[in-house]
Amino acid sequence: MRGLRNAGQGSKPVLIGETSPRGTGKVVPPLTFLRGALCLDSKYRKSKKCAAVPATGYAHHAYTTGQGPTFHPPQPNDVTIGVLSRLSSALSKAKKAGATTRTLPIWLTEFGIESTPDPLRGVSLQKQSEYRSISERIAYDNPHVVSFNQYLLRDDLPKEGVPKVLRYPGFETGLFTSAGKAKTSFDGFRLPLVAWRRGGKISLWGFVRPAGGATKATVEISSNGRTWHTLSTYTTDARGYFTRTVSDAKNRQWRLTWTGPGGTVYHGSPTRAYKR
């Protein structure tokens, strides 16, 4: 911080962290890194030799595995999207211990779901869209999160002339294929919709990303993924979000539809209901 102030950048936002979701033999687990950077021991007690860090927020990459956003890593110092509350709790403890000047908000500076054609880590294109939207809802529901960024927009280029199992060493988290074709997740990113099954009810959460303000959005339902019927139209809040609880409908798919100011009708990607 002293160096930034000396360079005339003392008023700029500063994020600490930029941590990976899980520890490996070469990567420090995120919560282990957090405690080390803030001079905290394993019980979140601060060393008297360190001053409180006046950062703006904490940056993290909450990637998950092919098991989806509800995956819970067994290692307690790992933080995937499904256990994002671990990071929230750690940051609250850090503030209480005097390690930071405020409870640091969370900036999810990278997030994405690997899809096919990656044969090892990739899920289906529909699951990619569903898992991405569910992850965004998890971030939305966490009051510590102030930023949720999609990575990538376009899949990395595959390697040529190698076996398929070695062809995709990069990221297939894009909204477009490496050739530039829109994936299912593109529509899901523009109009994300999550249907969480809770008892005999469905908790709907949706976001009209292009709206930039309050608008009306229609939830449609289908039994075959081809013929769609209107369930209801909802008014979003000032940011474009809405949440509603509706009766459960077995073996149905859901999607969000929005009509833009110019009259163009946009459809989100189909999603199934997931148990929460």
Image: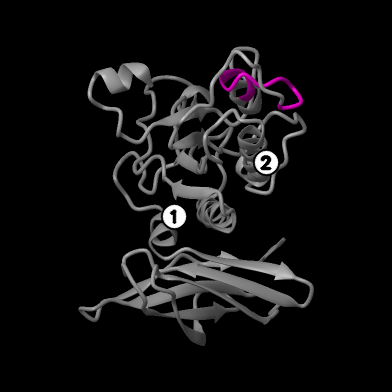
- Residue 82 in the image: state x and y as whole percent: 66, 46
Which residue is situated farthest in the left direction here?
262
Q: Is residue 251 visible?
A: no
Q: Which mark is residue 89?
A: 2
In the displayed structure, does residue 142 sit left or right of residue 8?
A: right
Q: Main secondary structure of the magenta part?
A: loop
In the displayed structure, does residue 233 sit left or right of residue 275?
A: left
Placement of 124 over or under 162, stated as above or below: below
Q: Secondary structure at mark 1?
A: helix
Inspect the image, locate mark 2, and give the three-letter code of the amino acid beneath it.
Ser
Q: Residues within 10 Å of mark 2 (few under 14, many from 20)?
A: few
Please tell me which of labels 1 and 2 falls first in the chain. 2
Q: Which residues are magenta?
A: 35-44
Inspect the image, locate mark 1, and give the three-letter code of the amino acid beneath it.
Ser
Placement of 52 over or under 3, stated as above or below: below
Q: Residue under circle 1?
A: 185
Q: Secondary structure at mark 2?
A: helix
Foreground pick, 216 / 91: 91
Is residue 24 located in the magenta-colored stretch of the structure? no
Please identify the quarter of the rendering in which residue 236 is found: bottom left
- Residue 276 in the image: state x and y as whole percent: 72, 61
- Residue 233 in the image: state x and y as whole percent: 47, 86
Q: Disc 1 and disc 2: Cα gap in Å?
A: 31 Å
- Residue 138 in the image: state x and y as whole percent: 59, 54
